[in-house]
Structure formats: C-alpha cells, structure tokens
Amino acid sequence: MSRLRAHLNDLENIPAFWVVGLLYCLTNPAPSLAINLFRGFTAARFLHTFVYAVVPLPQPSRGLAFGAGFAITMYMAFSTVMHFA
C-alpha cells in the first residue's frame, strides 16, 4: 500500500516540477545552477520514494526529502516570476 501512495505522491509532484522547470529554462539561468537544481530535485524525489516505500523510515526523513524537492521547485518558480515580472 505504501508503494502505491509513494507512486501517487510522485505523480502529484513531478509534473509540477516539469512545468516549473520548463518555464525556469526560458529565463536563461546559469547552466551550472540549473543543472544542480535539477539534480537536487531528482535526488530529493529518489530519497523521498526510498524512505516512503522501499525502507520506511520514521519522520522527519520523509518530510525533509519532500521539503528539499519542494524548496527547489519554489525557488525556480519564484525566480521565473521575478524574471518575467
């Protein structure tokens, strides 16, 4: 059951990141920053799925992994809004 919930959680978060990531790329960011943000989000989602479904660990491990990916997405969204504002 937790694997299904982990998969559904990924389906809620990853498409939003794709949209924000595409818009962020339109702002012509520094390549090294953009690559590291994409890598960080990917690592956070892998870690989140791992601690959620593969080896369930107690909180706050899952919350920290989710928060890292969410923070990266919000940073990119904020940078995009500020660029086009």
Image: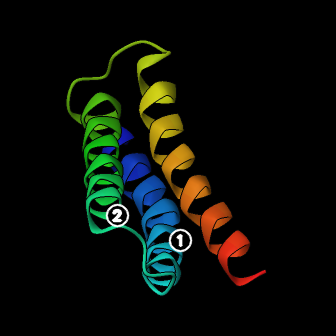
Q: Secondary structure at mark 2?
A: helix
Q: Residue at x 56, y 44 (%)?
A: 71
> Relative to 19, is 78 on the left or the right?
right
Where's residue 78, x and y in %? 67, 62
Q: Quadrant of the C terminus?
A: bottom right
| Mark closer to the chain start, 2 or 1 | 1
- Number of on-image labels: 2
Q: Residue at x 54, y 47 (%)?
A: 70
Q: Residue at x 41, y 33 (%)?
A: 65
Q: Which label belongs to residue 16?
A: 1
> Relative to 17, is 4 on the left or the right?
left
Where's residue 60, x and y in %? 49, 16
Nearest-to-viewer mark from 2 and 1: 2
Q: Is residue 12 above or below residue 9?
A: below
Q: Is residue 81 above or below residue 40?
A: below
User: What is the residue that sits farthest to the front in this orientation?
Assistant: 30
Q: Residue at x 54, y 62 (%)?
A: 76
